[in-house]
Image: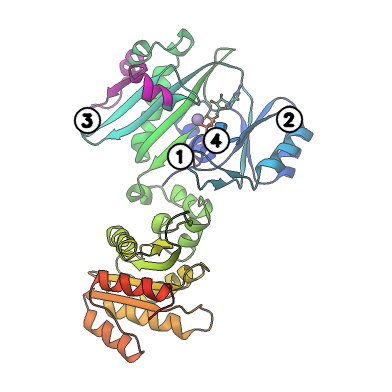
């Protein structure tokens, strides 16, 4: 689960990492009234999951309520795009924060180094918007330290890294405790990545986390129900919201925009398991078609979820045919078939030509149900993909 900046900073405050004073806002009126009550210089920061907001025009500075209102109107609803994220993300909310006078921007992160089986800490004195370039061109300017998880964090690690990375003197006193708090967050909240870029040294000598990027391991979320609830509170985009709304995980559904020069994305897909989902998309590509979406219905899907998933995929008007590809393990073929039949019995769904491949647990029962309802199930994935592509193209 990726957190937005304002959520990451909530965790920062819980562990004692200094953050700028600020407020979360969803309307320009919110921003206006807040700035009117708090005169000063403020930063308006678009709350999206993609990085590189500064370069994408998602960070603005305001010196009074009127300017703040105008900029907020400009930002809310805006589509932010970057090279890493060409599809972009719509801004739905802002974080309004005191503008700090920056003397220096450092970079600090903790991630999991799977090869070393240890958390890896990375620090650079060249933080800010061009840190990717630093990593590419001057990798030596990023200093690394692997923490032994059994021993945990000790302040000497922070002192050592500050020294090696040649952080400006102003950082030296605060850095070991900031890094220690970041390590606590990383461990206690089951993070896979925590990043502060920039960790700012202000002109008046404070060390402040000006940005926050936090990614949590979904399998540990049950330990923090309050944070797990953020999941539904703030899905990053429409697809994630739609997935959560029908009871799937946030990353279980994604639509793909049409690409110039590639086959039109007209085949809807439902599979169980991310691997089979991706394989299904490939099979459609190999058959000369374009998969409109990825939908992983997960293990143990019941008829109701199959029905909701069918409705979700066909709500994409581009979908001209559907390929449901289920390998029954925990998911039972008869449940899947029942869901399909129920979904298509309703008047509230858009019906498109349908190809179903069922194998595994209760596949026979499932096929019998489909048979009775007049469907012809296919045996193999390639056969199913070819058939779905042909149907999407309007032939039988
Ligand atoms: P990102 O581009 O998505 O990583 O967003 P950041 O929160 O890192 O902001 C991008 C850049 O905006 C920072 O590197 C700073 O240069 C600038 N910025 C953000 N907040 C402030 C602030 O309070 N004061 C000043 N002077 N610059 C800021
Ligand atoms: Mn940043």
Assess mark 3: CB under 8 A from ligand 2?
no
Of residues 149 and 312, the one nearer the viewer is 312
x, y percent for residue 288: 35, 64
Q: Earlier in the sequence, mark 3 or mark 2?
A: 2
Q: Residues within 10 Å of mark 4 (few under 14, many from 20)?
A: some
- Element type at marker 4? helix
x, y percent for residue 31: 71, 39
Q: Earlier in the sequence, mark 2 or mark 1?
A: 2
User: Rounded to the nearest whole Å, what is the CA distance between mark 2 and mark 1?
Assistant: 36 Å
When the figure is inspected, residue 234 is found, relative to residue 161, above or below; the finding is below
Mark seen at residue 84: 1
- Element type at marker 3? loop
Residue to which mark 2 is pinned: 38
Q: Earlier in the sequence, mark 1 or mark 3?
A: 1
Residue to which mark 4 is pinned: 53
Residue to which mark 3 is pinned: 150
Assess mark 4: CB under 8 A from ligand 1?
yes
Q: Earlier in the sequence, mark 4 or mark 3?
A: 4
Q: Earlier in the sequence, mark 4 or mark 1?
A: 4
When the figure is inspected, residue 181 is found, relative to residue 326, above or below; the finding is above
User: Rounded to the nearest whole Å, what is the CA distance between mark 4 and mark 2?
Assistant: 25 Å
Of residues 120 and 205, the one nearer the viewer is 120
- Which callout, 2 or 1, points to the residue nearer the camera? 1
- Which callout, 4 or 3, points to the residue nearer the camera? 4
x, y percent for residue 279: 28, 60
- Element type at marker 1? loop
Tag 4–tag 1 contact (CB < 8 Å): no
- Residue segment shown in magenta: 133-160
Where on the picture, by quarter, is residue 191?
Answer: top left
User: Rounded to the nearest whole Å, what is the CA distance between mark 4 and mark 1?
Assistant: 11 Å
């Amino acid at each position: 689960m990726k957190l937005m900046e304002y959520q990451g900073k909530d965790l920062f405050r819980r562990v004692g990492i200094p953050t700028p004073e600020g407020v979360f806002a969803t309307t320009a009126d919110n921003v206006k009234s807040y700035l009117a009550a708090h005169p000063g210089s403020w930063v308006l920061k678009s709350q999206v999951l993609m990085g590189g907001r500064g370069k994408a025009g998602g960070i603005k500075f305001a010196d009074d309520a009127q300017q703040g209102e105008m900029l907020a109107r400009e930002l809310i609803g805006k589509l932010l795009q970057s090279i890493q994220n060409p599809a972009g993300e719509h801004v739905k909310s802002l974080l309004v924060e005191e503008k700090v006078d920056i003397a220096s921007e450092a970079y600090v992160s903790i991630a999991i180094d799977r090869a070393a089986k240890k958390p890896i800490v990375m620090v650079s004195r060249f933080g800010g918007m061009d840190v990717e370039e630093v990593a590419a061109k001057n990798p030596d300017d990023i200093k690394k330290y692997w923490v032994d998880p059994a021993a945990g964090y000790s302040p000497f690690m922070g002192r050592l890294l500050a020294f090696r990375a040649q952080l400006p003197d102003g950082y030296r006193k605060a850095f070991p405790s900031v890094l220690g708090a970041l390590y606590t967050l990383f461990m206690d909240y089951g993070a896979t990545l925590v990043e502060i870029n920039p960790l700012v040294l202000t002109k008046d000598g404070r060390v402040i986390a000006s940005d926050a990027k936090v990614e949590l391991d979904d399998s540990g979320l049950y330990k923090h129900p309050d944070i797990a609830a953020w999941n539904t509170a703030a899905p990053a985009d429409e697809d994630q919201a739609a997935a959560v709304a029908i009871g799937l995980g946030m990353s279980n559904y994604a639509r793909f925009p049409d690409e110039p020069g590639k086959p039109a994305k007209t085949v809807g897909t439902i599979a169980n398991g991310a691997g089979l989902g991706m394989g299904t998309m490939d099979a459609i590509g190999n058959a000369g078609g374009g998969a409109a979406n990825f939908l992983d219905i997960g293990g143990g899907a019941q008829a109701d979820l199959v029905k909701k998933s069918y409705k979700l995929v066909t709500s994409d008007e581009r979908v001209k045919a559907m390929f449901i590809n289920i390998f029954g393990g925990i998911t039972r073929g008869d449940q899947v078939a029942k869901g399909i039949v129920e979904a298509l019995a309703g008047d509230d769904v858009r019906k498109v030509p349908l190809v179903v491949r069922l194998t595994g647990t209760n596949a026979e029962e499932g096929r019998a149900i489909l048979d009775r309802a007049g469907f012809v199930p296919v045996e193999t994935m390639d056969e199913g993909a070819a058939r779905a592509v042909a149907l999407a193209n309007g032939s039988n």
